[in-house]
Image: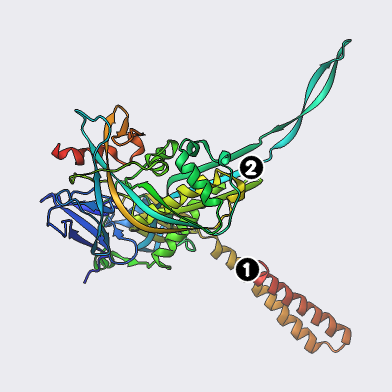
């Protein structure tokens, strides 16, 4: 008898039975009927909370494409006290006063513990992505107010929660490494508490995709297979 | 089905199916397309070549991909060079040397790079697997029964997880290597979105005698591309060594005879020393290079 390592199971929503549309290398799948998300671990569907966000900028006559982003609530612990001055922060952090204060206070307290919400794109990116200010980073520094909307079509979630947590750590550590040499070796504990996927509406503007929440832009070619995602999402538009 | 895919669409009903893996990385295989390997070998080595044996083998290799994320920070001191300059002392120009630092560099950046690496688990044997290409070939889900029908199948010496770890180290090493000449260097790099596919691509592996030389030759059994051509020097060299050894064993034997027949003490000492010297030479010839 032949042995196969691979098994094929129909991709249907385990809650409502609707066929789910998904890209070939997606790791999270979204039901456009009931709005739930699923990660498949071995043969089992594991439910993931999903919220589709209402656009907050002017989007009249624009076609919206929803792209997935992880929103991870995290407790951060730092045992030792450091002396970090706000002026040592990198310019991309200093633009947000609230986050700058939060970051400095976290390092300047003994046995510090605070909560932080990371936004990490779940959509696949190309090597071009690192050349720009990513919306995930900007949303983390300055979290948007999110108003939920009805379920939408969404595909392209290539990063699992495990990967997203690793990216979140790097995001924090890169701010740390760009701040002061004295905190380079700081022992930081990340306790990832809750996570959900937020569907962020984007619209096209020439070679860019603009998010309809804060208006941040990303190059279309910084997204892995944007044209495929677009044709998949554009089926019902 | 391409590597790394998590789902696939049915061509007939347009439904999406999830690909779930039971153990480790998914395995795929290609069917051999070349049905007359001897003809290929004759084409390479000529009609008079003697094909000692030719086997169809499935030797697995692994294609892994990952995204390396993190940050790097480093400093390169550079070197001091003295360049001539001139000062105007009022009356005439004096030549002086002004030291400059060139090649100094400071880096501090975030890393997010998608990389791929191909691992050949048969690295201790020479089959030329690294030259196998997957482009344009049709790979099917691995089926033990089908591949065994075609030829011999090699197993991975280590679990797939260990190859993924090795690939991660290699990918991180690829990034660090660019900064090997930095005087100070720190990094925090991790691999995420790791994926691996084990490929079983059939190859023909042959031993051939042509023009008085022995060869090992392998080629891709799907597209016919040559993978390895090795002249077997070892056999010739070892034959020479063994011929030399035979003569030396003869000398030792002769010395023994001399020692037993010669009555003088001096003659016995000379015979013994000659035997000892020959034995030492035998030892050097046999084990000296090892």
Image location (x, y in percent) of residue A40 = 26, 60
Point 45% across, 47% down: residue: A171
Task: Give the quadrant of the C terminus of chain B.
Answer: bottom right
Element carrying mark 1: helix
In the picture, the disc for residue B22 is none
Between label 2 and label 1, give the one nearer the viewer: 2
Point 25% across, 68% down: residue: A3
Element carrying mark 2: strand
Point 66% across, 66% down: residue: B289
| Chain under callout 1 | B
Q: Quadrant of residue B156?
A: bottom left
From the viewer's perspective, is A223 left or right of B146?
A: right
Residue closer to the observer: B168 or A235: A235
| Chain under callout 2 | B
- Mark 1 and mark 2 in contact (Cβ < 8 Å)? no
Q: Which residue is mark 2?
A: B75
Point 42% across, 36% down: residue: A133
Query: Gap between marks 2 and 1, in whole Å?
Result: 54 Å
The image shows a total of numbered marks equal to: 2
Q: Which residue is mark 1?
A: B241
Q: Give the mark nearest the N terminus, 2 or 1.
A: 2
Residue closer to the observer: B76 or B178: B76
Image location (x, y in percent) of residue A237 = 15, 36
Residue closer to the observer: A100 or B64: A100
Residue A214 in view in this figure = yes
């Amino acid at each position: 008898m032949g042995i196969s390592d691979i098994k094929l199971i129909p991709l249907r929503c385990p809650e409502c039975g609707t066929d789910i549309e998904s890209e070939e290398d997606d790791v999270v799948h979204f039901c456009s009927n009931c709005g739930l998300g699923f990660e498949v671990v071995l043969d089992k569907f594991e439910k993931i909370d999903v919220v589709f966000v209402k656009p907050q900028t002017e989007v009249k006559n624009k076609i919206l494409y929803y792209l997935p982003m992880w929103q991870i609530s995290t407790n951060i612990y730092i045992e030792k006290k450091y002396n970090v001055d706000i002026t040592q922060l990198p310019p991309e952090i200093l633009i947000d006063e609230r986050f700058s204060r939060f970051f400095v206070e976290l390092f300047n307290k003994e046995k510090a513990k605070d909560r932080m919400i990371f936004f990490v794109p779940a959509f696949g990116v190309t090597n071009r992505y690192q050349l720009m200010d990513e919306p995930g980073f900007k949303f983390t520094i300055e979290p948007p107010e999110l108003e939920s909307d009805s379920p939408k079509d969404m595909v392209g979630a290539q990063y699992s929660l495990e990967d997203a947590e690793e990216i979140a750590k790097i995001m924090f550590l890169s701010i740390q490494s760009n701040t002061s040499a004295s905190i380079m070796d700081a022992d930081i504990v990340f306790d990832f508490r809750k996570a959900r996927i937020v569907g962020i509406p984007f619209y096209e503007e020439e070679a860019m995709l603009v998010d309809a929440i804060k208006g941040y832009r990303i190059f279309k070619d910084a997204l892995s297979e944007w044209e495929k995602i677009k044709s998949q999402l554009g089926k019902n538009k | 089905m391409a590597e790394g895919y998590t789902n696939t669409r049915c061509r007939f009903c347009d439904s999406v199916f999830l690909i779930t893996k039971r153990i480790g990385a998914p395995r795929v295989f290609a069917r051999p397309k070349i049905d007359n390997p001897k003809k290929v070998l004759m084409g390479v080595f000529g009609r008079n070549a003697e094909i000692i044996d030719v086997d169809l083998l499935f030797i697995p290799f692994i294609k892994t991909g990952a995204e390396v994320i993190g940050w790097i920070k480093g400093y390169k001191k550079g070197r001091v060079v003295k360049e001539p300059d001139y000062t105007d002392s009022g009356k005439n120009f004096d030549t002086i040397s002004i030291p400059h630092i060139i090649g100094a560099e400071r880096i501090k950046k975030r890393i997010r790079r998608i990389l791929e690496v191909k691992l050949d688990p048969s690295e201790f044997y020479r089959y030329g697997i690294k030259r196998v290409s997957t482009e344009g070939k049709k790979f099917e889900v691995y089926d033990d029964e089908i591949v065994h029908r075609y030829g011999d199948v090699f197993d991975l010496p280590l679990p797939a997880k260990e190859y993924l770890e090795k690939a991660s180290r290699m990918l991180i090493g690829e990034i660090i290597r660019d900064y090997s000449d930095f005087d100070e260097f720190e990094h925090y790099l991790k691999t995420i979105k790791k994926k691996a596919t084990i490929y079983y691509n059939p190859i023909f592996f042959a031993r051939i005698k042509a023009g008085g030389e022995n060869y090992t030759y392998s080629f891709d059994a799907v597209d016919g591309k040559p993978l390895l051509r090795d002249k077997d020097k070892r056999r010739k060299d070892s034959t020479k060594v063994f011929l030399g050894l035979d003569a030396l064993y003869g000398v030792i034997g002769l010395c023994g005879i001399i020692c037993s027949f010669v009555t003088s003490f001096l003659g016995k000492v000379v015979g013994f020393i000659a035997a000892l010297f020959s034995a030492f030479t035998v030892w050097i010839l046999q084990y000296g290079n090892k």
